[in-house]
């Protein structure tokens, strides 16, 4: 299975994401934002970082890059897409996911190991978890506060589109403790915390993040 | 053309609140609230196409999920 990892100018965690794909048993494929070529990959990861220096709004300019036009079209056709941190911001800016990420309510960059509750274990990226399971992966952001209009939040909750919620303290003031959401078809997932930093005991607080990448390998096979 | 982008009233603005706190510490107690926004100045060749400029403002300069735009077209 070939999992693409897009590098934008200012991406930081593309190498870690590729490593996580490899540890899960997939073949990472490096993709460049300025190309119009998805290279036939089976799924795509948008990594963390500060694409375009967070100019204008975090993720705003990357969301309008050439390759993102292909990602949006392919996602509407069912391609699994995972956005982590800045990648989540890019997905919201591109319209693939609802809501927006704004400045943390306390204005501080927050970097810590974070408990998440898995609310949806049937998306392309979470089927190796169980609903209600608690996982610990790092969170590190300055603009991670998830917001949307109250009516939209009610609709998302009603449709079961909240995939992860913060537990043991909300690190950024996100509405309703939302850490991650999914598309209507469960193929596109975005979250602020970093599963790719929790795939090996040596370097992470756990190996709880590996399940994202093993999940999508199964989702691709079963598609 | 000038475009001002401001957070929607229902979106909290922690940066504006931080500025408000600083003003209070400086003794400017009469300031009741601060909302921080962005100010864009666009120079356009020829006669500005108002519809196009509106589209630019609403699809790139602002994120309609969280922000409102105010367009200020040059008066002739």
Image: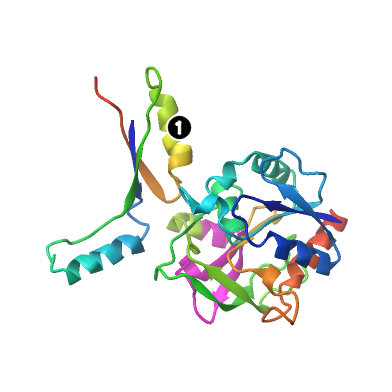
The outermost residue toward the top is B46
Q: Is residue B39 visible?
A: yes
What's the image's color scheme?
rainbow
Closer-to-camera residue (B49/A52): A52
Q: Position of residue A79 (x, y in %)?
A: 75, 49
| Residue at horizontal 86 percent and vertical 66 percent from the top | A25
Within the magenta stretch, is there residue A176? yes
Q: For the magenta stretch, what is the residue range?
A: A154-181
Disc 1 crowd rating (10 Å Cα; few below 14, some 14-19, many 20+) is few
Q: Is residue A112 left or right of residue A210?
A: left
Q: Is residue A125 visible?
A: no
Q: Is residue B20 above or below residue A99?
A: below
Q: Is residue B21 above or below residue A65?
A: below
The answer to which image quadrant residue B41 occupies is top left
Secondary structure category for the residue under label 1 = helix
Q: Which residue is mark 1?
A: B55
| Residue at horizontal 79 percent and vertical 63 percent from the top | A21
Q: Is residue A176 above or below residue A202?
A: above
Q: Is residue B14 above or below residue A75?
A: below
Closer-to-camera residue (B71/A219): B71
Q: Chain of mark 1?
A: B
Q: Position of residue A77 (x, y in %)?
A: 74, 43
Question: Where's the N terminus of chain A, which quadrant?
Answer: bottom right
Q: Position of residue A129 (x, y in %)?
A: 74, 73
Q: Position of residue A139 (x, y in %)?
A: 57, 72
Within the magenta stretch, is there residue A64? no
| Residue at horizontal 25 percent and vertical 58 percent from the top | B34
Q: Is residue A186 left or right of residue A149?
A: right
Closer-to-camera residue (A183/B55): B55
* Number of marks present in the image shown: 1
């Amino acid at each position: 299975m070939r999992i693409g990892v897009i590098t934008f100018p200012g991406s930081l965690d593309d190498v870690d994401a590729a490593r996580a794909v490899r540890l899960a048993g997939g073949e990472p494929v490096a993709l460049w934002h300025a190309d119009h070529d998805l290279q036939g990959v089976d799924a795509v990861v948008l990594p963390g970082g500060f694409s375009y220096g967070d100019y204008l709004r975090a993720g705003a300019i990357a969301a309008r890059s050439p390759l993102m036009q292909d990602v949006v079209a392919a996602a509407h056709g069912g391609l699994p897409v995972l956005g982590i941190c800045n990648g989540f911001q890019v997905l919201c800016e591109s319209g693939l996911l609802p809501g927006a990420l704004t400045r943390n309510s306390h204005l501080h960059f927050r970097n810590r190991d974070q408990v998440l509750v898995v609310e949806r274990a049937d998306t392309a990226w979470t089927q190796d978890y169980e609903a209600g399971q608690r996982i610990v992966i790092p969170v590190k952001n300055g603009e991670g506060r998830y917001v949307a209009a109250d009516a939209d939040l009610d609709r998302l909750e009603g449709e079961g589109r909240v995939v992860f919620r913060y537990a043991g303290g909300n690190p950024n003031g996100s509405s309703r403790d939302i850490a991650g959401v999914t598309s209507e078809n469960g193929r596109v997932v975005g979250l602020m915390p970093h599963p790719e930093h929790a795939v090996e005991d040596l370097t992470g607080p756990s190996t709880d993040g590996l399940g994202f990448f093993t999940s999508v390998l199964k989702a691709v096979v079963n598609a | 053309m000038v475009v001002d982008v401001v957070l929607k009233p229902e979106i909290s603005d922690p940066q504006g609140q931080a500025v408000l706190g600083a003003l209070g510490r400086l003794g400017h107690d009469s300031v009741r609230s601060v909302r921080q926004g962005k100010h864009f100045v666009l120079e356009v060749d020829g006669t500005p196409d108002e519809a196009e400029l509106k589209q630019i403002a609403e699809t790139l300069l602002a994120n309609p999920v969280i922000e409102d735009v105010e367009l200020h077209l040059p008066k002739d």
